[in-house]
Image: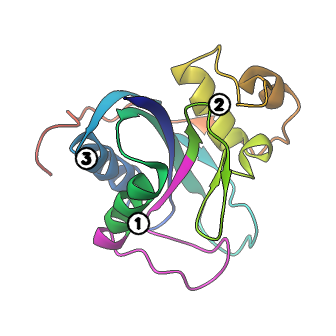
Amino acid sequence: MMTDAFIGLGSNLEDPAAQLARAVTALATLPESVLVAQSPFYASRPVGPQDQPDFVNGVVWLRTSLTPHALLDHLQSIEQQHGRERLRHWGPRTLDLDLLIFGDQTLEDERLTVPHKELPNRDFVLQPLLDLNPDLTLPDGRSISALRQHCTDNRLRKLPPINRDPLAPS
């Protein structure tokens, strides 16, 4: 059975928009998964420590038969391939991939919380989700559009598209 999964992408190091474009390419080739769509990329202030560059963020919509934990393993592997280092909570990073929504499932364990616990507080996640599916709701019935209306402004700025085929080699 295929499940709709929404993956948040973020970067603020080493050409962030290019990092995200390469991540989309990697996500498009995941096993047992199909890339449905990708959102525009947005720039925004960092959450947490402000002594770092602005972030570039986006969201990818996948249909997958992977389990949430298997998908998480793939996401973490892609992060490692991009040189992700976890040096400081909410610190700078080459690539951050978060499993935001996994169908209508809710899950909370030591490795994974779905829906992502900070999703309602992140305009740089909510807006790209709306770009992909304006009628999207969380498993508890809250609409992404209502959450977006009440979300703190993080100086979100839509970036021009990167002309890149997600299946083309990097």
Residue 160 appears in view: no
Relative to 101, residue 55 above or below? below
Q: Earlier in the sequence, mark 3 or mark 1?
A: 3
* Residue drawn at 36 percent across, 45 percent down: 66
Instruction: Provide the secondary structure element on which disc 2 rests.
Output: helix
**Contact, mark 3 vs mark 2 (Cβ under 8 Å):** no
Query: Which region of the structure is painted magenta?
Result: 80-99
The image quarter containing residue 42 is top right
Classified by dominant secondary structure, the portion drawn in magenta counts as loop
Per the model, the C-alpha gap separating discs 3 and 1 is 12 Å
Q: Nearer the viewer, mark 3 or mark 2?
A: 3
Q: Residue at x 78, y 41 (%)?
A: 120
Sequence-first disc among 1 and 2:
1
For the N terminus, give its image quadrant.
top left
Which of the marked residues, 3 or 2, is nearer the chain's N terminus?
3
Question: What numbered label is drawn on residue 76?
Answer: 1
Q: Nearer the viewer, residue 77 or 155?
A: 77
Q: Nearer the viewer, residue 14 or 77?
A: 77
Relative placement, left or right, of 21 versus 100 is: left
State the image quarter where residue 15 is shown: bottom left
Q: Could you give the CA–CA distance between mark 3 and mark 2, rounded to whole angstroms?
A: 25 Å
Spatial CA distance of label 1 from label 2 is 24 Å
Q: What x and y, as percent, mark residue 76?
A: 41, 66
Q: Secondary structure at mark 3?
A: loop
Q: What residue sits 71% from the left and 45% below the top?
A: 119
Q: Residue 30 has which mark? A: 3
Tell me where residue 39 appears, x and y as whole percent.
Answer: 47, 30
In the figure, is residue 170 to the left or right of 22? left
Disc 2 marks which residue? 127
Q: Residue at x 28, y 70 (%)?
A: 81
Q: Residues within 10 Å of mark 1 (few under 14, many from 20)?
A: some
The reply to whether dot 3 and dot 1 touch (C-beta < 8 Å) is no
